[in-house]
Image: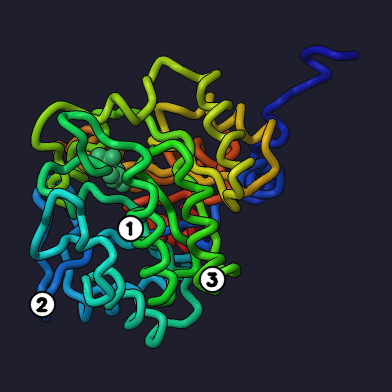
Amino acid sequence: MTGFPTVRARRLRRTPAIRRMVTETRLDPSRLVLPAFVVNGEGIERPIATMPGHAQRSVDRVVDLAREAATAGIAGMILFGIPDEKDPEGTAAWDPDGPVPRALRAIKKAVPDLVLWADVCLCEYTIHGHCGPLRGTEVDNDAALPSLARAAVTYADAGADVVAPSDMMDGRVAAIRSGLDAAGHENVAVCSYAVKYASAYYGPFRDAAESAPAFGDRRSYQMDPANAREARREALLDVDEGADMIMVKPAGPYQDVIRDLRDRIDLPLVAYQVSGEMAMVEAAAAAGWIDRDRIIIESLTGIVRSGADIVITYFALDAARLIREQL
Ligand code: PBG
Ligand code: ZN
């Protein structure tokens, strides 16, 4: 008795109450993390043209946003900094008075329950916009490691709960872990952007963070979008180096990779729904071609269904509202 008409799949789709009961994937604001861009100054909220609803904010305004995020039940925020001055080494990345450390201290004080993440990379801080110092025209992997560790320690000193290296240098998780431990930050977690593809979906972010490479591209350190076996290898290497969480980025176009890593790695798995994924939704919604609210929920549901425990998303505040309204 295994087929129609005895079996009817529609029985469990009849009413909203039944559908809610049998749903396999439940979105919750407590698994969402909101990105924010921090600049120096006060009272600044400079809209980012390619990222509707998002802005470069001074510390006081980021604190306002943090309050909003906490009220909405969002897990945390991940901070990116835009310094006043850049140099070839990216030394502003470990300036304790830079925008990110100041924001971390202020948010920690005002909204202690929010999980504070700091993105760790050098591209926002180098004049050439690459994620490490150069040797000739190549990014010098090993020379980047002490700088990344130093930046991570600076953010931990300022109150970061999680540091998230996004540079894709080999060996950086181990370098950051030992730097943190040596500075007495053995309880600060490392979330590795282990599987970060060289993606065109980062375009809008690079406007926001003013971090586009001045020459060339990031393909000598970020991954080839064609590779999935290599993703497994990258993730396992970072598990081995002591990562506490593993990230896949972008999220939507790489759900096969999310699923594969979920099935193989027991650490919390993070997916980053990046700026380009958001921009496409906003553009189509602005044209009246799609239903923005439903697409937000559907895209996030897909990412969670494919195995992500935590999602970093520019839609975190919208999603929290929609989840509350049970869209
Ligand atoms: C910096 C960094 C990038 C993103 C997060 N950290 C951009 C890049 O690698 O060029 C992208 C985030 C987004 O597009 O939303 N290493
Ligand atoms: Zn970078």
Residue 275 appears in the rendering: no
Camera-side residue: 140 or 46?
Answer: 140
Position above or below: 130 against 163 = above
Position above or below: 107 against 49 = below
Q: Which mark is residue 35?
A: 1
Q: For ligand 2, which image quadrant applies? A: top left
The residue at 53%/51% (across/down) is 310
Q: Quadrant of the N terminus?
A: top right
Which residue is under mark 3?
Answer: 185
User: Image check: 39 left or right of 109?
Assistant: left
Camera-side residue: 57 or 238?
Answer: 238
Q: Amino acid at mark 1?
A: Pro
Badge 3, how many Cα within 10 Å: few under 14, some, many 20+?
A: some
Position above or below: 30 against 305 = below
Q: Percent from the top left, x then y, of residue 240?
A: 63, 41
Q: CA distance from mark 1 to mark 2?
A: 19 Å
Report helix, strand or loop for mark 3.
Answer: loop
Q: Percent from the top left, x then y, of residue 159?
A: 43, 76
Camera-near label (1 vs 3) is 3
Q: Percent from the top left, x then y, of residue 110?
A: 38, 86
Q: Amino acid at mark 2?
A: Gly
| Lower position in the chain sequence, tag 1 or tag 2 | 1
| Lower position in the chain sequence, tag 1 or tag 3 | 1
Q: CA distance from mark 1 to mark 3?
A: 23 Å
Q: Is mark 1 within 8 Å of ligand 1?
A: yes
Q: Amino acid at mark 3?
A: His
